[in-house]
Amino acid sequence: MLKQLFLIATLALAIGWNASAQADTEWKQKFEQLGPMLPTPNTYRTASGAPGKDYWQMQADYKMAVTLDDSKQQITGKETITYYNNSPDPLDYLWVQLDQNMRADDSDTPLANARKYRDTLNVKDYYGLANSPGFEGGFNVHYVKSAGADLKYKINKTMMRVDLTKTLQPGEKVSFDIEWDYFINDRMTDGGRSGLEYFPEEDNYLYTIAQFFPRMAVYSDNEGWQNKQFLGSGEFALSFGSYEVAITVPSDFVIGSTGTLQNPKDVLTKEQQKRLAQAKKSFDKPVFIVTEEEAIANEKTKDSGTKTWVFQADSIRDFAFAASRKFIWDAMAVDINGKTPLAMSYYPKEGNPLWEEYSTRVVAQTLETYSKYTIDYPYSKAISVHTASIGMEYPMICFNYGRPNEDGTYSDRTKYGMIGVIIHEVGHNFFPMIINSDERQWTWMDEGLNTFVQYLTEKDFEVTFNEPFPSRRGPADKIVPYMSGERGLFRPIMTNSEQILQFGNNAYAKPATALNVLREVVMGPELFDYAFKKYAERWAFKNPSPADFFRTMEDASAVDLDWFWRGWFYSTDAVDVNVANVEWYRMASEDNQLESKIKNSKDLSNSTSQINQTPKPLGFEDVKYRGEFKNTLDEESLKAEMSDKNFYKVTFKNEGGLVTPLLIEWTYDDGSKEFEKLPAEIWRKNEQEVTKMFIKDKKVVSVSYDPFKETADVNEEDNVFPRVDEPSRFEKFKGKK
């Protein structure tokens, strides 16, 4: 009770100082609730962030047969799509995505791209400007039929409208057939998420095949049809369904694919079948199903026959595969709470020795960590395929770079770059392949959340592999160069995928950092992890929106985070806290002295950036108490206790605009330190400047903000009071020399 009384006495002074500063500031509503900015809750999506009692989503099942022609580098295919109308709305037409049309002659992609250009062009620049000259890209749709009768359809760039002969009523389904073909792009010259890589020394190809079939667009309760054109950045919005896919390739090819292999006896040798069975029981190291020696021999065969591999999968939103005669193939089992999916890798000899050492073990680590923070991995396998180009993700399979030098040596940059991209792309099995967000609209909901859990997996990698991991994204200090840049050069996180500037920083790094700050600084790991896992459980195999994520994180934690979403996700503000002034006070020595203001106090603008060497006198105000407090007040004892205390009035300025908790480190004259945390709500009455009085037993020699670089503060020079003279960049350079 005594401690409460003298805190009340000093609080009155602190409130007075804050009130005077507030009059000169502009209120920017940083602590107002997000309610008016978010969609109105309804029976489909509740105010808690959970799916509502009437939540629905469409289903699209596929049965298809495709052929990969290695001589023409061409895909031909036929598919039957069965579409279930689970919505309350009657539908007269359906929208189908034709993503390969991004490479067609009439594509808007090269026309809509504008950027700064150098005075020189490389091959990829030229191909981008000229829209892959000499390459006949895009889908050739031969027909769309239902029950043998032609359906009318209209192709608009990367979207195809299929006109139904009869309105599809709620609760009904319709089946229709499409036949198509397209030529496979060269990933090395044309770029792209999938395609081919040519190996001229042995005249072989490695194919990573995705977006290879017409796919249903999403029809949802909150968007209607998501038929926004595919320009290249905004990825995909897809519905869940079942897939049965037969893939015909040259007989000496090995295939890695989404789904479970249905006919292993038809496409694998007896020895390969035996090894695959062994891999299902090997939890400590990978088992080779196809060895490097066998793959090298396979490269030389060029069989003229074909084999058809059949794969089946349920509750997936997409399908992809990789095929080559060059593949080495290894696998091991992973224990996910009693379930044992297989971690697999497919890679050419050019990937060794790096890939056989790390790839499959990293896949296993990723499944374990992501299952811990989200939901248990539900599928039968997860595959990492090696290519020389960028990484890309699909259900159960992903394509990853990281190629050693020709002599087999590799740098740490190549090694950790490969490991990082494998974690990231395998992690996409959870975001968005299971927690199925709309990538066409909100890149951060899959890339940002995934990059955040990637960072947690990299921390687990350090433990499992007993070696440090140089994480590029996630730690707060890594985002400082981006957030300290010119405001006009970036956009808020809540920006449509096609309008984002600095894509990697905006959609990957900043949201990952925001979530790390939210976990470590704002909420604490226990509250955050529970809420984050609850979001994953609520929206697994469903279609969440940003509001569902924001609301769930608050609902499951009882932490008001609207200020956090406003600052980190809806603005381009940065954290820049200035410890503007520190003043030292001790109680006045004369008894019964009543003062309403501090004597000889100086205006902050005249601060010398030093803590005053002689304390200023602080008067005691005789506060009148009522009721029970009157009898418990021992004024003399209170003044005696206060006379031994040091009082420090600290002024913090919000220079960057982004409100944040105040992480304070006190350094005392005996060399000891104390860490103290104030919640972000300290800014709620004045978003630009706050002053607070602290009571300390020891004499303070310095006060610093964010000493461990946990909040992404963009200017460390004003984080310490008194100021510390930092050497210039030139002086640091001279010191290194």
Image (cartoon, rainbow, N blue to C red):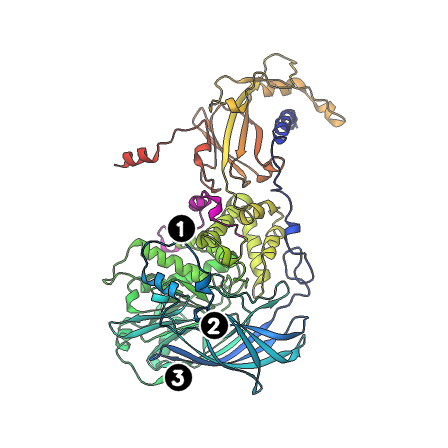
N-term-proximal mark, 1 vs 3: 3
Q: Quadrant of residue 74?
A: bottom left
Q: Using residue 23 as the reference point, say whether residue 446 is left or right of it.
A: left
The residue lying at 42 percent from left, 52 percent from top is 459
Magenta region: which residues?
464-493
Between residues 426 and 714, which one lies in front from this camera angle?
714
N-term-proximal mark, 1 vs 2: 2
On screen, residue 591 above or below 54: above
Question: Looking at the rendering, in which quadrant would you find the N terminus?
Answer: top right
Amino acid type shown at disc 1? Arg
Numbered disc 2: secondary structure = loop
Residue designated by label 3: 266
How busy is the neighbourhood of tag 1: few (under 14 within 10 Å), some, or many (20 plus)? few
Q: Which mark is residue 472?
A: 1
Amino acid type shown at disc 2? Phe
User: Are circles 3 and 2 on residues that touch, CB within 8 Å?
Assistant: no
Say which of marks 1 and 3 sits in front. 1
x and y percentages locating residue 32 in the rendered image? 64, 44
